[in-house]
């Protein structure tokens, strides 16, 4: 048995318990490597070994965080552990959030954590300071490379006695943690050197990379709402009863388009929310709380808007990737423009 002991965290799917039918699975453990953990074990050889796998349903972890955290912490304290590994979670939002939650638990127990994740997964952004996250592709198709990169980092972690270098040197995603260190040249000289290189067209590396934000120029204000066709769009997951398009509760891969002709009010008999990640009780009691069709009809009757568009669009924002959100926005925007819509009210949760 290898001296370096690893506990591996997986969701119900990769833990080979089941698919969405087991998403509410409470934490359980197996004293062996499971699923991707077998590949991890084989690649690590005699250097390290997975001694336990903790498996939890994605919905259970995200909807019962206190109970899930307590049980997982209990499992982790049963044995001497050198490292926690989670995933890879790719771009699966609920899974990524659960892996991030495990990173936070590991931090509380002073245990190092390594997870595989797609950079746009919200689990990385929310929990990156609690451990080392290794970049993977956005889908399970990148599993082989993801496992190889995680193994490379684990080997590096062991070789450096748990003190890997900077992200670009050690192969993990930036954690947003700054550390003071002494530099030979003072900041003013380094800044001038970079400026000169930039002017001369030479390569240089900034010491303080700035985040890249999309800038969308706002449209001019609507001059006359009383003559305008207005649409409603929501990321709050309001769908006809039964969720006919099967929009996912998290990490949505689609949006829905639904008729509003003759609908004066969204009732709980005909509409519901498909959104995970928040308590749906109040949204299901009165879906107008998320998508205010009743108020829009009042404005229509009062002549404050010209007309409410005959369709509304809905998707789920919970864990949905930026790439998918952009694609949804573009597609919905093009349809609304084609239908002559002049203003859109976008609601969330």
Image (spheres, rainbow, N blue to C red):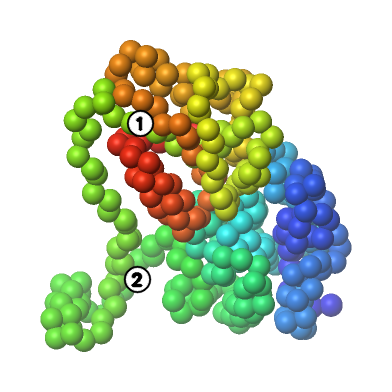
Q: Position of residue 3 (x, y in %)?
A: 77, 76
Q: Residues within 10 Å of mark 1 (few under 14, many from 20)?
A: many
Q: Position of residue 133 (x, y in %)?
A: 55, 65
Residue 230's mark?
A: 1
Q: Measured along the vertical axis of the image, is residue 14 above or below residue 161?
A: above
Q: Is 309 on the left or on the right of 126, as rendered?
A: left
Q: CA distance from mark 1 to mark 2?
A: 56 Å
In this rendering, the label closer to the viewer, 1 or 2: 1
Q: Secondary structure at mark 1?
A: strand
Q: Secondary structure at mark 2?
A: loop
Tell me which residue sits at (34%, 37%) in the image. Answer: 341
Q: Residue furthest top?
A: 302
- Residue 190 badge: none
Please give the name of the residue rendered at 50% of the width and 28% of the height, measured from the top-left corner: 260
**Residue 3 appears in the figure:** no
Q: In this picture, is 283 found above or below 320?
A: above
Q: Is residue 229 visible?
A: yes
Check disc 2 and report the residue beneath it.
181
Closer to the camera, 137 or 189?
137
Q: Looking at the image, which residue is at 35% across and 31% down?
A: 230
Position of the N terminus by quadrant: bottom right
State the image coordinates of residue 124 (x, y, percent, origin top left): 52, 57
């Amino acid at each position: 048995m290898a001296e370096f002991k690893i506990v591996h965290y997986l969701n119900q799917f990769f833990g080979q318990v089941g698919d969405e039918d087991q998403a509410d699975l409470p934490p359980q453990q197996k004293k062996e490597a499971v699923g991707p953990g077998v590949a991890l074990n084989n690649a690590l050889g005699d250097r390290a070994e997975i001694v336990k796998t903790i498996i939890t349903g994605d919905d259970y972890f995200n909807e019962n965080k206190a109970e899930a955290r307590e049980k997982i912490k209990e499992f982790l304290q049963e044995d001497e552990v050198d490292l926690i590994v989670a995933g890879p979670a790719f771009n699966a939002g609920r899974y990524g959030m659960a892996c991030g939650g495990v990173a936070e638990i590991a931090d509380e127990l002073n245990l190092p954590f390594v997870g595989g994740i797609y950079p746009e997964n919200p689990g990385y952004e929310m929990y990156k300071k609690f451990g080392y996250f290794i970049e993977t592709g956005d889908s399970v198709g990148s599993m082989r490379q993801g496992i190889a990169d995680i193994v490379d980092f684990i080997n590096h972690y062991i070789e450096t006695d748990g003190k890997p270098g900077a992200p670009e040197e050690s192969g993990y995603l930036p954690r947003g943690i700054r550390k003071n260190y002494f530099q030979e040249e003072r900041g003013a000289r380094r800044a001038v050197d970079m400026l000169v290189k930039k002017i001369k067209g030479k390569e240089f590396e900034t010491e303080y990379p700035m985040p890249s934000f999309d800038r969308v120029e706002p449209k001019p204000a609507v001059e006359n709402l009383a003559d305008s066709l207005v649409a409603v769009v929501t990321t709050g997951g309001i769908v006809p009863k039964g969720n006919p398009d099967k929009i996912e509760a998290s990490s949505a891969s689609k949006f829905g388009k639904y008729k509003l002709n003759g609908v004066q009010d969204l009732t709980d008999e005909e509409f519901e929310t498909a959104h995970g990640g928040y308590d749906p009780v109040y949204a299901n009691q009165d879906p107008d709380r998320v998508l205010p069709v009743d108020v829009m009809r009042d404005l229509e009757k009062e002549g404050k808007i010209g007309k409410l568009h005959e369709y509304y669009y809905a998707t789920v924002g919970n864990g949905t990737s930026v790439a998918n959100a952009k694609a949804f926005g573009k597609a919905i925007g093009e349809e609304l423009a084609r239908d002559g819509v002049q203003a859109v009210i976008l609601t969330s949760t």
